[in-house]
Amino acid sequence: MVAKVQSRKLLHKSDAGAVRLGLASERAVRAAFKELSTVAAANGVDKNADSDGVAVQPMIAGGVEIMIGITDDPL
C-alpha cells in the first residue's frame, strides 16, 4: 500500500516527506498515518483547513508515471 497526505498546500509531497511506500501490513499503514499527520503539521498544513486527510491506495508496480501541469491563462 501507499499513503500520501492530501493537501493543496503541499505541491511536492515527496520532497516534503509526505509519502510512505511499500506498506505491507495494517500495522504499517496505521504507523504511516500517524507519521504523515505529524509531517503535514510540520509543513504548516492545518488538518481542518488545508487537508483532505491521508490517502491510502494500492501500490502498483511497473507502468509509466506521468505528471501534467496546466495554467489557466485568461488571454
Image (cartoon, helix red, strand yellow):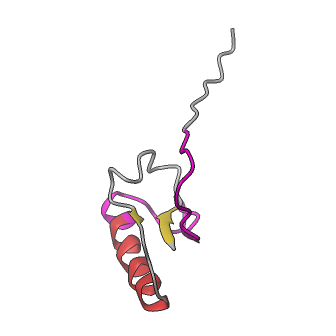
Q: Quadrant of residue 46?
A: bottom left
- Taking depth in this image into account, of 11 and 68 the one nearest to the observer is 68
Q: Residue at x 45, y 45 (%)?
A: 11
Q: Residue at x 47, y 87 (%)?
A: 25
Q: Answer with left or right where residue 18 lies relative to residue 3.
A: left
**Does residue 54 show up magenta in the picture?**
yes
- Taking depth in this image into account, of 56 and 40 the one nearest to the observer is 56
Prevailing secondary structure class for the magenta stretch in the rendered image: loop
* Residue 52 coordinates in the image, percent (x, y): 59, 64
Give the extent of the magenta segment: 40-66
Q: Answer with left or right where residue 63 lies relative to residue 42.
A: right
* Residue 63 coordinates in the image, percent (x, y): 57, 50
Q: Residue at x 56, y 63 (%)?
A: 60
Q: Quadrant of the C terminus?
A: top right
Q: Name, please, the residue furthest toward the bottom.
A: 27
Q: Give the answer, above or below, for where 23 lies relative to 46.
A: below
Q: Give the answer, above or below, for where 43 lies relative to 48.
A: above
Q: Give the answer, above or below, for where 47 lies relative to 32.
A: above
Q: Name, please, the residue furthest toward the top.
A: 75
* Residue 45 coordinates in the image, percent (x, y): 42, 60
**Does residue 43 show up magenta in the picture?**
yes
